[in-house]
Each structure stands twice: as C-alpha cells, then as structure tokens.
Amino acid sequence: MELKRRPRRLRANETIRSMVRENHVRVEDLIYPMFVMPGEKKKVEISSMPGVYDFSLDEFVIELRKVVELGIPSVLLFGIPENKDSVGSGAYHEHGIVQEATRLAKKHFPELYVITDVCLCEYTDHGHCGLIDNGQILNDPTLDLLAQTALSQARAGADMVAPSDMMDGRVGAIREVLDKEGFSHIPIMAYSAKFASGFYGPFREAAGSTPQFGDRRTYQMDPPNGNEAMRETALDVEEGADIIIVKPALSYGDIIYRTKERFGLPVAAYNVSGEYAMVKAAAANGWIDEKRIVTEALVSMKRAGADLLITYHAMDVARWLREGGQV
Ligand code: PBG
C-alpha cells in the first residue's frame, strides 16, 4: 500500500499521543459543588451520591482544607436550611446557612473562590424555585427575592453568584441590585441553558428539594430544544451574565458547543448529580473503570467547548492529576 496519510503515526506511543493531545482537564477547570447544613460535627453521606456529603459548618471547614490542598480553585455552595417556608426566607437571610458558610470559607481560605447558588427551591417548603400562588409559580415577584439572595451572599463575601432558578429576567434583576449596592465587581455565572432533567434526582434527595406538587417544566427548559437554549442564553448575556452554565452536561454536548461558538463567553458544564450517580453505581458493580469513564466524560465537555467543569468528581480528579495521570 502506498498510503500517504497514516493517522496512526501520531498514535504510536504515549509520548507522541500526549504531544498532540488537543484537550486537557486541568485542576484550574474544576468547581466543586458542596452542601452545607446547620449543626455541628455532622457529615452525612448522600445515599445516591457515594462520596458526597452534607456538611455542618465545622466539618465543612475541615473538608475545605482538603479542597484547597488539592489545588481546586473554587467551590459552589448549596444550603440545606434548618427550616423551610413558603417564601424561602432561609435563602436571603443575613445569617442563612450559605451566607455563614461563605463567611467561614473566606475567613479560613481567602484565596478560595467561593461561588454561591442563587435559588429558592432548597428553602421553600413546596420545593419550587419561585413563589407560589394558587398552584402557579410567580415570576416577577420572585425576582426581588432572588436579587436579595444574591445580595446577601455578596455581603457575606461570595466571589461570584450563580442563579439556577430559571425565572425570566433574574440575571438583570440580580445585576441591578448588586450594582446599586456596591457589588458591581461580582460576576454572575448564570444557569442559562438549564433543562428540566431527570438527571437532577440525587441532588433533590440531598437538598430535600423535590417539588411537592407538579414539576419544574414551566420554568426549566424542554430537553428536546436546542434553539430555545440559544434564545434563553442570549437574554442572560444581554442582562449581564459573565459565565454561562449548560446543565446537565453529558447529554448536552451540542448545547455546550453551540453556546461557546455563538457567545464566546466562558462556558461551564455542570456534570450533575444523576450523571455522577450512574458512574458511581456502575463502578461499584465493577462494570466500568471509574477513572477512565470520569476523565473521558470530563474531557468530552472540554472538547465540546466548556472552559469550566462543575463536578462532584472534582476531588478525585484533582488527586488523579496530582498522581501524574493523563486526564
Ligand atoms: C436548584 C438546583 C438544582 C441543581 C442545581 N441547582 C436542582 C433542580 O433544579 O432541581 C441540580 C444539580 C445536580 O443535579 O447536581 N435549582
């Protein structure tokens, strides 16, 4: 055979493969989602997410030390409040659980980049992301509470806020209040393309945030829709989003790709709880090689165009990178 082009030449051994490798997962890409709750000396494993815990604040600080030691630059905080009510008041209380966790994190680890989730669903007794009237989720009255949530988090020292509620106009509402109150330097990482997904199941177990009636399809997006995701993202960009989240990640590589191509802003892929649970369950059964699967999944998000990876695997990945593995 007189083949001129032989792609296999550049695959001959690991040295040349690593020289021509196009994408990498770096520890700097990782954002580690963490759950915090009131109380002391409590570290409760989430049963459908082995290796992921709800931490009381003292345990949270202990865990953060490991996060920092591994070189993970950033955490994304979710709060599990003591009490829930119909208006989600724990979300925007000055001494709410996320606000307190943020203060502690910044006090002990000033370099750690603390991102806070802005949403009501972990704090409402009905489990929806907005106020309710007569079984309807109210959009505009919810905006003020979301803005107050972001403001209280910024006041507690959050470096960046991440609204995940999917109400119309929330990025603009948050930007306006932050700017007015002296936080024009705080970026917004918006869950712009957030789909009404079955992959959030384990998170809802962790947060106790399963809607008590109905579902989230009137505000989160319909999974078959790609063009709608672009329209939704365009609005968030107009309203001032600095970073765009695509969520879930694994089944939405096309959305990651289109978002990056179209808007050119930093894109974060959210490797959600159900994606994590599937890998953990299969690995526990010995059916897959966990490290290979995780690293392949994460680098596929980078290949699709993601800059940042929000993942519950962050600690493991950081360890693997430290051991010198190719990720
Ligand atoms: C809250 C929120 C959810 C997740 C992140 N923020 C749950 C939901 O929308 O029901 C899911 C994260 C995950 O599954 O890992 N709005």
Image: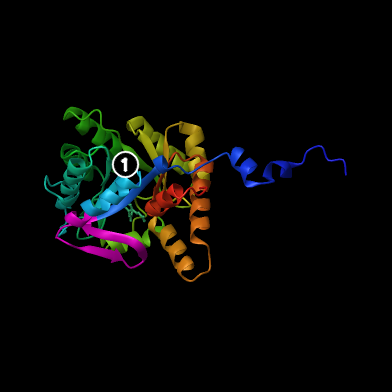
Along the line of sight, the residue nearer the viewer: 66 or 290 = 66
Q: Quadrant of the N terminus?
A: top right
Q: Position of residue 166 (x, y in %)?
A: 33, 46
On screen, residue 5 versus residue 181, left or right, reads right
Q: Position of residue 299 (x, y in %)?
A: 51, 46
The residue indicated by pointer 1 is 168
Q: Is residue 175 visible?
A: yes
Q: Position of residue 167 (x, y in %)?
A: 30, 45
Which residue corresponds to the image point at 25% horizontal and 60% vertical from the top-left?
54
Along the line of sight, the residue nearer the viewer: 44 or 11 = 11
On screen, residue 82 versus residue 72, left or right, reads left
Name the outermost residue toward the right. 1
Which residue corresponds to the image point at 22% horizontal and 43% vertical from the top-left?
146
Task: Point out the stretch of residues depicted in magenta.
Answer: 36-60
Helix, strand or loop at label 1? It is loop
Which residue corresponds to the image point at 29% horizontal and 53% vertical from the top-left?
34
Q: Is residue 122 visible?
A: no
Residue 274 on the magenta segment: no
Ligand 1 resides in the quarter of the picture at bottom left
Residue 48 on the magenta segment: yes
Q: Residues within 10 Å of mark 1 (few under 14, many from 20)?
A: some
Which amino acid type is shown beneath numbered disc 1?
Asp
On screen, residue 57 versus residue 167, left or right, reads left
The answer to which image quadrant residue 152 occupies is: top left
